Image (tube, helix red, strand yellow):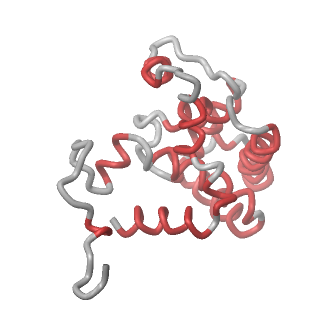
Amino acid sequence: MQKLMAAIAAGGVAPAIAAAHPIELYRRLTEDGAEPSNGETALGAADWRPIFLSAKQDELLVAVSETMVPGSTSAQVHRFIDLLLSVDTADQQKAFLSSLAAADEESHNQFQRAFAESNAGDREKSLTSLSQSHKDAFGNVKEWIVGAYYSSEQGMKELGWDGNFAFDKYPSCEQVEGHS
């Protein structure tokens, strides 16, 4: 719950960041009467192919996502990010692709092989190095992955969501005695 509240607070403190948040982009996808179930169905399709990313970029995103947040593959984080990028601004798309490529470059520099082809230990070392040498690139990719994962049913359940769509009362909205 603390992670969720911190993420919400970060959205309030940094509106520029919040505008590119996965939930905001998903809202854009469903504007103008679009059916959200169509996008959701496409994400789960057996013959799914990336809309925005190339196959190689998607493979890299799967590897980076799973290394950063284990369980990202089963939560289909890469598919959701691809869908969101397909409706994002050109600047955001470019920034994401640059950040993702930085992870691959770091792996090539350290281990002379692509990130997706590296073992788990080398992947972790590459991301640790990236987080120190290219903080902005690391932060950008991490924000997308963490936002997408914790926006998924699997991620929300990890945070304590029980599947109910409505709550009797919201813990953060309880009034303190003497305050209105």
**Residue 89 % position (x, y):** 76, 39
Q: Residue at x 26, y 72 (%)?
A: 174
Q: Is residue 92 above or below residue 47?
A: below
Quadrant of residue 85 within the rendered picture: top right
Side of 171 relative to 129 (left or right): left
Q: Is residue 119 above or below residue 173?
A: above
Q: Residue at x 60, y 34 (%)?
A: 28
Q: Is residue 133 above or below residue 112?
A: below
Q: Residue at x 41, y 41 (%)?
A: 152
Side of 157 relative to 128 (left or right): left
- The reply to whether residue 122 is visible in this rendering is no
Q: Nearer the viewer, residue 95 or 91?
A: 91
Quadrant of residue 40 within the rendered picture: top left
**Residue 11 % position (x, y):** 56, 62
Q: Nearer the viewer, residue 11 or 127?
A: 11
Q: Residue furthest left?
A: 168
Q: Residue at x 72, y 45 (%)?
A: 100
| Total tally of numbered discs in the picture | 0
Q: Nearer the viewer, residue 175 or 13?
A: 175
**Residue 84 % position (x, y):** 61, 35
**Residue 88 % position (x, y):** 70, 37
- The reply to whether residue 47 is visible in this rendering is yes
